[in-house]
Image (cartoon, helix red, strand yellow):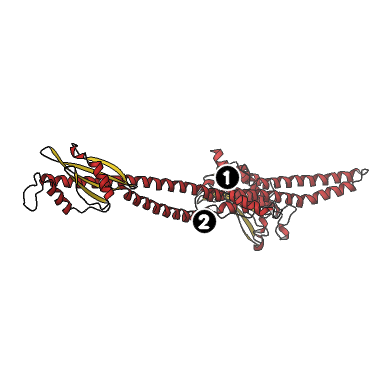
Amino acid sequence: MSRRRPAGRHRRAFRGARTRILASYLVLLALSTLVSVLASRQILLSRTGERVDAALVQEAEEFGRLVRDGRDPRTGNPFGGDIASIFDVYLSRNVPGEGEQFLTLLDGEPYRATSPDSRVVRTLVERLGGVSREPRAVRGELEVDGATLRYLAVPVRVEGRPRGVFAVAENLSREREEVVDAVQVAAGVSMGVLLVASILAFLVAGRVLAPLRDLDRTARSITDTDLSRRIEAEGDDELAELARTFNSMLDRLEQAFTTQKDFISDAGHELRTPITIIRGHLELMDGEDPDERRETVDLVCDELDRMSRFVDDLLLLAKARQPDFLRLEPLDLDAVAGELHTKAQALAPRDWRLDADRANGRVVADRQRLTQAVMNLATNAARHTEPDTPIELGAALANGEARLWVSDRGPGIAPAERERIFERFVQSGNARRRSDGAGLGLAIVRAVAEAHGGRVEVESAEGLGSRFTVIIPADPEEAGDEPDAARTEASAQR
């Protein structure tokens, strides 16, 4: 097996996205280079022909001007019918360019030529013998020893009678060879550029696809016990967005796994004790003593009630991060405070007081969840104070935040425990604050506040009492840390 894995990795490498991208890039670049080179060659050859034609026409026009307007430099008079003098003057004044040749015919016979190649001259003479009788200039091409010559022959007439021919020819093959050499150089340069571009493309593709490799490694490293790995997402491109989406998915999975583990751990932690109590009393229950049986049944029912309340609390905490946990609606904060004060008076005989002078305004919140959180705080305050002790409930709206608090004059909380008391199954170490509760009340309060995008604050001094404040944004959509649950439900309400 170990010998096959490297081969498998090599096969995957050849079939990988990086290889496919590079191959596609090379094919497209090679095709574009080939098309570019061929198109350039064709364009250059076409322009070469046009340039040669322009040069031939220019020479012919210069010769025509000399015939019409020229004067014999020896006499200063017009040439008249002296064609030989015209040829001599033109050839003496004009030097043919590289690859260019002049040829003159006088009365059908070769007169003078600038080409040193006798075969070229002979071939031109044979081809141009009848041009003097033509009414206009004649163009053409001919092959001599594998070379292509393009020529332009101008007939010369005197008083309507053909007397001679002036011809200019250029080696088109030589011009084309220069074009081919230039195209070959360009093709070589393009191949070099293609090679360098391929190397750079290979490196760039590796950097571009790095998030995908990180995603693969992260996905392979994730187990049901470790969901902490994340992918570094930089930039604003599609791959960075994919990495952020993957990280968001991992956040949701980790949250779901954590909630599940917490629920299982909490249930196992807290249900074990009442189950043991119930089992023990049922095993010891004497069927012949009605009083003992009644006492046992009452104890079992009490434990079952406590288990039911505990399960309800656990389920609430488990659902606190679900999208449907909150049902948001606009609430009158002053009316909510009044309802809370009325409900709190039924909890215990305490001196319940209400401070809602600054509660004028509306908030967007879940009435039932908010009531549940504040009533948990009120129950805590009642549980740790004596009868007729003042307990204040208050509400205020300011700076875009709604604040609801419960203040008591109980034993207070030690500074070291003010954060821990919001954790599950944690109760204050103060003897007067310990109770038979499961230690989930304050955890529920914090869960409700955070679901609204808010928080819980506590102020306390040992021996002087405590004040718990639930703080939520007046409008959840204005809170920077608004949870998905609140956003989803708020959108549904609108």
Q: Which mark is residue 203?
A: 2
Q: Is residue 449 visible?
A: no
Name the residue that disc number 1 marks.
486
Q: Residues within 10 Å of mark 1 (few under 14, many from 20)?
A: many
Say what secondary structure mark 2 lies in.
helix
Q: Which picture quadrant has residue 92?
A: bottom left
Q: Position of residue 486 (x, y in %)?
A: 58, 45
Q: Position of residue 293 (x, y in %)?
A: 88, 44
Q: Is residue 103 left or right of residue 297?
A: left
Q: Residue at x 34, y 52 (%)?
A: 178
Q: Position of residue 142 (x, y in %)?
A: 30, 43
Amino acid under disc 1 = Ala
**In this rendering, is residue 135 above or below 185?**
above
Q: Is residue 244 left or right of residue 180?
A: right
Indicate which disc, 2 or 1, sits on the residue closer to the N terminus.
Answer: 2
Q: Residues within 10 Å of mark 2 (few under 14, many from 20)?
A: few
Say what secondary structure mark 1 lies in.
helix
